[in-house]
C-alpha cells in the first residue's frame, strides 16, 4: 500500500485511538474489541444499530423462512419478524455498547482528512479508523423500474400485504430463499435469472435439487432470460423479459430486485482524501485489511470478498487489532475455511472448494459422497433428501472442501469447518465418536466411505492369509 500523501497535516495529539464507521456486524466487533483492550473508541452509525443483518438481512429473512415453513400467514409472519428483531436488538443496542465503554454516536460520519472525522458538528481526531459501512442492494438501470412497485431485500420488510403475484429478478441465494418463503405464504412466484440455472456459484447437481424443489412448490423458473424493461399491463405492471428467442411480459403486483449488493463507498469522504477502491468497487485493502493509508482499515461487505455476517465479524476483530497495534505488529485474517449457508429447501451448506471451483482452478480432487437416504435420523424424520460430500486430494484424506445439502445442513457444517480449519482429515472424523441417531453421523459415514475406498487390497490379502494361518 502507498504511503500517506503529504498534503494532510497529521495532528500532534489525538482525541481517540479508534473511530469505527458503521455499526453492523463488522463495526460492532471492531468497537467492542477496541474498548475491551482499553482503547478510547467512538462508533458512528447513520442508520440503525445492528446494520443490515439485524434490520433487513439475516434476522428478518430467516425469520420469514421459518414462519412460512411453519404454516403461518403473512400477517403472522410479519409479527414474528418484528418480535425476532425486538428480541435480538438489545444485543446490538447503543446502550449496551456504551456500557462496554464505547462512545456511540448516531449520525453521518465524514472523513475530513486521514485523521479527522466530522460527526454532528464536531470534529474528532483519531489514531486509526475502521470503515465498516457495509453494502446495499444493486438497482439496475431498467427502463420503467423507477415508476413501478418494486422492492429490494432492504425495503421488502415494509410490505403490509402479501403480493398475489411476485416476480423476483435474480436467482442467487437471496432470490431463491425469498421465493420459497413467499410461495409457502401463498404468493404466485416467478424467478427471472439471466444465467442458465439458479445458484450459479453452486455445483450443478446442488442447484438442480433446489430447482426441483421449487417446481414442486409451483414456482415458475425463467432461467436464461434477460430483463428488458418494466411496462404497464392494464391497471398494473409487467416485467418484459427475453429468453428462448422471444420476448414475453410477466404481470406482477410486486417486483423484488435481488441481483446483488454493492459496497457503500459514497458519502463519507473516501474520494476526497484519496482512499483507493478495487476494480470491483470495494475499498482496496491489503491482507491485513489496511487501505493505502495504513491506519485506515476496512472490513466486512465494504471490502469483501465475502458478504457474510460471520465473515464481517471475523474481519472486524482483525481490523481493530491492526488499527490499534499495526505500528508494532499485524495479524492477518485466515480464510482457509470460510463457511456459507443458503437457507433454501433443501438447505445448502459448504466450506472450502466445491467441484465447480476445483475444476476452474485446475485442482485435482476425489469425491466422497454419502446420501442422507442412508442416514437413520433422516429416515426417522422423513427428511432424507440430500447428501454430504467431501473433496480430498487424490489418495489423501485432507479436506479440500465439503458440501452438505439437506435438512439441517447449516448446523452440520460447523464440524466440517472445524476439521478443515485445523487440518483434521477424514481419518480423524472417522475416529471420532458421533452420537446416535443424529444428522452429524452423516459426516462420519462419509469419512467411512472414504476409508473403504482407500483400503489397500494388498493389505487385505495379507490379512486374509494371516487369519487363515490363525485358523490352522
Image (tube, rainbow, N blue to C red):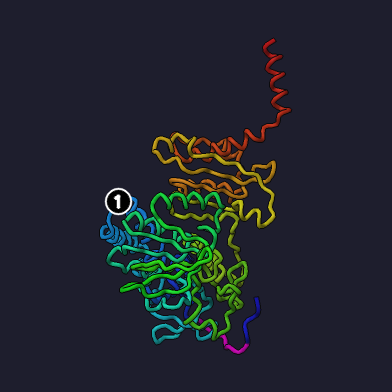
Query: Magenta region's main secondary structure?
Result: loop
- Name the one closer to the observer, 212 or 301: 212
Q: Residue 279 location in percent, x, y?
A: 61, 74
Q: Is residue 26 left or right of residue 217?
A: right
Residue assigned mark 1: 71
- The mark total stands at 1
Residue stretch in magenta: 6-14
Quadrant showing the C terminus: top right
Q: Quadrant of residue 235?
A: bottom left
| Residue at image location 46% in from the left, 35% down from the top | 435
| Residue at image location 69% in from the left, 26% down from the top | 460
Q: Residues within 10 Å of mark 1 (few under 14, many from 20)?
A: few
- Name the one closer to the observer, 289 or 340: 340
| Residue at image location 65% in from the left, 80% down from the top | 3
Q: Residue 342 location in percent, x, y?
A: 47, 55
Residue 11 visible, this angle:
no
- Name the one closer to the observer, 435 or 408: 408
Amino acid at each position: 500500500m502507498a504511503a500517506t500523501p503529504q498534503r494532510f497535516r497529521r495532528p500532534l495529539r489525538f482525541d481517540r485511538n479508534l473511530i469505527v464507521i458503521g455499526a453492523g456486524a463488522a463495526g460492532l466487533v471492531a468497537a467492542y474489541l477496541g474498548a475491551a483492550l482499553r482503547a478510547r473508541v467512538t462508533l458512528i452509525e447513520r442508520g440503525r444499530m445492528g446494520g443490515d443483518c439485524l434490520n433487513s438481512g439475516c434476522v428478518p429473512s430467516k425469520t420469514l423462512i421459518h414462519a412460512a415453513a411453519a404454516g403461518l400467514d403473512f400477517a403472522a409472519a410479519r409479527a414474528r419478524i418484528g418480535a425476532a428483531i425486538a428480541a435480538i436488538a438489545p444485543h446490538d443496542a447503543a446502550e449496551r455498547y456504551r456500557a462496554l465503554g464505547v462512545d456511540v454516536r448516531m449520525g453521518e460520519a465524514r472523513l475530513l482528512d486521514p485523521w479527522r472525522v466530522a460527526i454532528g458538528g464536531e470534529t474528532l481526531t483519531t489514531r486509526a479508523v475502521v470503515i465498516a459501512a457495509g453494502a446495499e442492494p444493486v438497482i439496475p438501470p431498467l427502463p420503467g423500474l423507477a415508476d413501478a412497485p418494486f422492492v429490494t431485500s432492504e425495503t421488502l420488510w415494509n410490505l403490509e400485504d402479501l403480493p398475489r403475484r411476485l416476480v423476483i429478478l435474480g436467482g442467487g441465494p437471496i432470490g431463491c430463499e425469498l421465493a420459497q418463503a413467499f410461495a409457502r405464504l401463498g404468493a404466485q412466484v416467478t424467478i427471472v435469472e439471466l444465467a442458465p440455472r439458479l445458484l450459479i456459484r453452486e455445483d450443478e447437481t446442488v442447484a438442480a435439487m433446489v430447482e426441483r424443489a421449487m417446481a414442486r412448490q409451483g414456482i415458475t423458473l425463467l432461467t436464461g432470460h434477460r430483463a428488458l424493461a418494466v411496462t404497464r399491463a392494464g391497471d398494473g405492471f409487467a416485467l418484459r423479459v427475453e429468453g428462448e428467442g422471444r420476448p414475453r411480459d410477466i404481470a406482477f403486483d410486486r417486483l423484488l430486485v435481488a441481483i446483488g449488493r454493492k459496497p457503500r463507498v459514497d458519502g463519507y469522504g473516501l474520494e476526497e482524501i484519496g482512499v483507493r477502491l478495487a476494480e470491483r468497487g470495494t475499498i482496496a485493502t491489503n491482507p491485513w485489511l489496511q487501505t493505502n493509508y495504513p491506519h485506515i482499515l476496512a472490513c466486512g461487505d465494504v471490502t469483501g470478498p465475502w458478504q457474510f455476517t460471520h465473515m464481517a465479524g471475523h474481519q472486524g476483530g482483525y481490523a481493530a487489532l491492526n488499527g490499534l497495534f499495526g505500528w508494532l505488529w499485524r495479524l492477518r485474517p485466515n480464510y482457509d475455511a470460510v463457511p456459507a449457508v443458503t437457507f433454501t429447501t433443501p438447505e445448502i451448506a459448504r466450506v472450502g472448494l466445491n467441484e465447480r471451483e476445483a475444476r476452474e482452478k485446475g485442482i485435482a480432487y476425489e469425491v466422497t459422497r454419502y446420501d442422507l437416504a442412508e442416514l437413520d435420523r433422516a429416515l426417522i424424520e422423513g427428511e432424507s433428501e440430500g447428501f454430504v460430500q467431501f473433496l480430498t486430494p487424490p489418495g489423501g484424506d485432507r479436506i479440500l472442501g465439503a458440501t452438505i445439502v439437506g435438512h439441517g445442513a447449516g448446523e452440520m457444517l460447523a464440524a466440517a469447518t472445524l476439521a478443515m480449519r485445523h487440518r483434521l482429515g477424514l481419518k480423524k472424523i472417522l475416529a471420532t465418536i458421533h452420537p446416535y441417531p443424529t444428522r452429524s453421523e452423516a459426516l462420519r459415514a462419509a469419512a467411512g466411505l472414504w476409508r473403504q475406498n482407500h483400503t489397500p487390497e494388498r493389505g487385505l490379502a495379507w490379512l486374509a492369509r494371516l487369519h487363515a494361518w490363525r485358523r490352522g
